Image (spheres, rainbow, N blue to C red):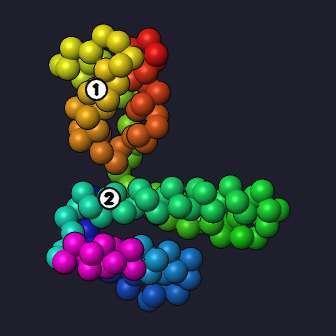
Amino acid sequence: MVTREDLEKQLKDAMRASDEPRKRTLRMILAAVKLAEVEKRGPLDEAAVLSILQREVKTRQEALADAERAGRAEMAEDVKIELRIVQSYLPAAMPADELEALVRQAIAEVGASAPADVGKVMKSLMPRIQGRADGKEVNLVVRRLLGG
């Protein structure tokens, strides 16, 4: 897990190494973390920092798609670099077979049997896989296993 202090240390290291893309990306992440701390009126825990990192990944994925649609190759390359940097701070993605096993376990725990129970399964499942799998991907697996 990553904390604000870890990110600040990484920023200092990037500044010493004159690593402009990493420095720029870490400054954006830290700005988002500081904004969230101001809104919360206190320090963030690791889970909150993780959710900010996930949000930053989604933002950069959208920016990458926009840049590619607009034909701006240089901007797209910059965004790809930033995306890789942000993803390096996230936990490793959960393998598909492990995700499916967790979904099956959650379905059994909740007693879900129909597509109408997707919400119950997701509510039970998401805290366990926070940061290791995308919510859309999890939702697709749940729907497939429930027959919806």
What SS does tag 2 mark? helix
On the image, the x and y values in percent for residue 8 come to: 32, 80
Q: Give the numbered dot on residue 50.
A: 2
Tag 1, which secondary structure? helix
**Does residue 111 lie above or below 106 as drawn?**
above
Residue at image x 39%, y 17%?
A: 115
Q: Could you tell whether 109 is left or right of 63 in the image?
A: left
Please tell me which residue lies in front, 139 or 10: 139
Residue 19 circle label:
none
Q: Quadrant of residue 127?
A: top left
Q: Which residue is under mark 1?
A: 121
Q: Is residue 35 magenta?
A: yes
The amino acid on which the numbered mark 1 sits, given as a three-letter code, is: Val
- Residue 94: within the magenta? no
Q: Quadrant location of the N terminus?
A: bottom left
- The answer to whether residue 8 is above or below residue 106 is below
Q: Position of residue 2 (x, y in %)?
A: 28, 64
From where the camera sits, is residue 10 visible?
no
